[in-house]
């Protein structure tokens, strides 16, 4: 099956441009920032949007109240606005309850969060399940604060509402699904959050216009609670998921990392390994571990879905100190890194689409290739030698047990060549597809 063609450099630039548009929106696990983000994605894709009311049970969790914020500030004793939500939505701890009062510096200090090791950066903090309020600021500004009375104001609301998530679905030839999940709950941060959103959006824009073997389901959900909610509402359909990837942290300059599924030996694991090994770039492949992003929920033992995660630098690995700070911004994420990650996702999808098994229809000894014009008559160009080799490998291994990727791995021949040669053997009635 052919897949879409894309111009790598161009798609990287488009993704970065879309990220720039999404960057200013103040997102959280619920609220209008999520809806506004989805509305922008809808300019590219048809989405099915679901609103789940606050108080709804989702396994061991309960959908929280909906949080929205209009503005927030802190005014120092001299009347200077030293923190303004307008300048950065990271200044307010996500899910802060509304407050407006005058307090002393010593009362304020426990509610201010900074990064002493990164004095020029604003941290990103949340307090979803513990009603509280707080501000985040640069440590270098924090240490300058003087004694006196401060006016603090957070114009937010925390009320019964709903949790919003969206799905893009494209029906393929099979009911079997390829799941790609990203999260839409972080405010102005690029690598951790928006890189996944723009990559998933652009993958879907291409996938929607081509015929595919798999059906594709792309989730735009708030992290953790959104994944738990989606799983709780779709439990009966999960058996269709044959491959899954959690898309996050895709635009930094680090090399690509593939985090395996919980079982570690699913088809997606084999495909991702093959793609990275053949990329001629640095990469790492790591075993599943039970923290991280939404693979935690997809790979919980009650579901154990074949979901891996293809990322660049993993948070907490020491390679991504910008994680959850104002440094994870539009300059930190580069269009060329997004483009490179996009091409890896494409390659994984391309191989999974074409990773089928065949039966050799002439299994007793080799078929006579010469009379079918399949064997080189003259010359010994390298390319045709490889093609001949591919013919022998495919015919020998197509016993219904080995997929084209198995054959590419065993033969050390390129998957694309194996697929091209297999297509030709089908035309000559030497292979039959096993459904
Ligand atoms: Zn995060």
Image (tube, rainbow, N blue to C red):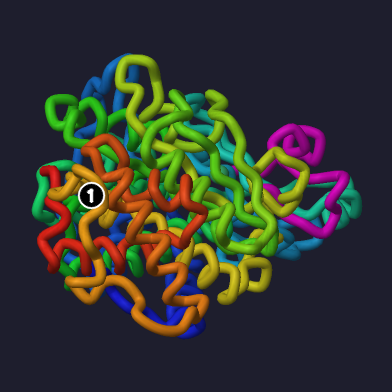
Quick one: quadrant of the N terminus? bottom left
The residue lying at 66 percent from left, 62 percent from top is 281
Towards the viewer: 377 or 333? 377
Compared to residue 183, the image places residue 326 above or below, namely below
Give the extent of the magenta segment: 100-123
Q: Mark yes or no: residue 214 visible.
A: yes
Residue sitting at 27 percent across and 31 percent down? 229
Q: Is residue 290 left or right of residue 178?
A: right
Question: For this rendering, which residue is in front, 157 or 217?
Answer: 217
Reply yes or no: does residue 387 show up in magenta.
Answer: no
* 120 within the magenta span: yes
Does any portion of residue 165 appear in the rendered image?
A: no
Q: Mark 1 points at which residue?
A: 217
Residue name at image x 59 percent, y 49 percent: 92
Ligand 1 quadrant assignment: top right
Helix, strand or loop under label 1:
strand
Q: Dot 1: within a 10 Å radius of its alpha carbon, few (fewer than 14), some, or many (20 or more) residues?
A: some
Quick check: 235 left or right of 149? left
């Amino acid at each position: 099956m052919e897949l879409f063609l894309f111009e790598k450099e161009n798609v990287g630039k488009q993704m970065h441009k879309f990220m720039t548009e999404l960057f200013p929106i103040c997102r959280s696990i619920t609220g209008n920032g999520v809806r506004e983000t989805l509305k922008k994605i809808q300019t590219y894709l048809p989405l099915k949007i679901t609103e789940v009311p606050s108080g709804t049970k989702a396994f061991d969790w309960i959908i929280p109240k909906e949080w929205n914020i209009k503005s927030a500030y802190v005014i120092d004793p001299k009347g200077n606005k030293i923190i303004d939500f307008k300048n950065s939505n990271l200044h307010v701890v996500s899910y802060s309850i509304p407050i407006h009062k005058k307090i002393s510096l010593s009362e304020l200090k426990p509610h201010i969060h900074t990064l002493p090791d990164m004095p020029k950066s604003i941290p990103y903090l949340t307090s979803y399940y513990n009603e509280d309020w707080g501000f985040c600021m640069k440590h270098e500004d924090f240490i300058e604060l003087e004694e006196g009375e401060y006016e603090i104001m957070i114009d937010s609301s925390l009320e019964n509402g709903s949790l919003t998530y969206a799905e893009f679905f494209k029906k393929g030839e099979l009911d079997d699904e390829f799941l790609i999940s990203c999260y839409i709950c972080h405010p102005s941060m690029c690598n951790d959050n928006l890189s996944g959103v723009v990559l998933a959006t652009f993958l879907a824009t291409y996938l929607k216009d081509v015929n595919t073997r798999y059906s594709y389901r792309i989730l735009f959900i708030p992290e953790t609670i959104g994944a738990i909610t989606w799983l709780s509402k779709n439990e009966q359909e999960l058996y269709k998921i044959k491959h899954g990837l959690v898309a996050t942290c895709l635009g930094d300059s680090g090399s690509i990392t593939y985090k395996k599924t919980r079982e570690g030996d699913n088809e997606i694991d084999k495909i991702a390994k093959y793609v990275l090994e053949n990329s001629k770039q640095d990469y790492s492949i790591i075993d599943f571990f039970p923290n991280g992003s939404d693979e935690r929920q997809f790979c919980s033992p009650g579901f154990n879905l074949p979901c891996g995660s293809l990322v660049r630098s993993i948070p907490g690995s020491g390679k991504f100190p910008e994680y959850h700070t104002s440094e994870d911004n539009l300059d930190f994420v580069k269009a060329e890194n997004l483009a490179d990650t996009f091409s890896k996702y494409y390659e994984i999808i391309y191989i999974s689409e074409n990773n089928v098994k065949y039966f050799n229809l002439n299994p007793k000894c080799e078929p006579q290739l010469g009379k079918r014009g399949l064997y080189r008559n003259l010359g010994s160009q390298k390319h045709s030698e490889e093609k001949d080799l591919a013919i022998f490998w495919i015919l020998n291994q197509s016993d219904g047990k080995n997929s084209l990727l198995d054959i590419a791995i065993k033969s050390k021949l390129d998957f694309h060549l194996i697929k091209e040669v297999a297509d030709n053997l089908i035309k000559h009635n030497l292979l039959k597809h096993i459904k």
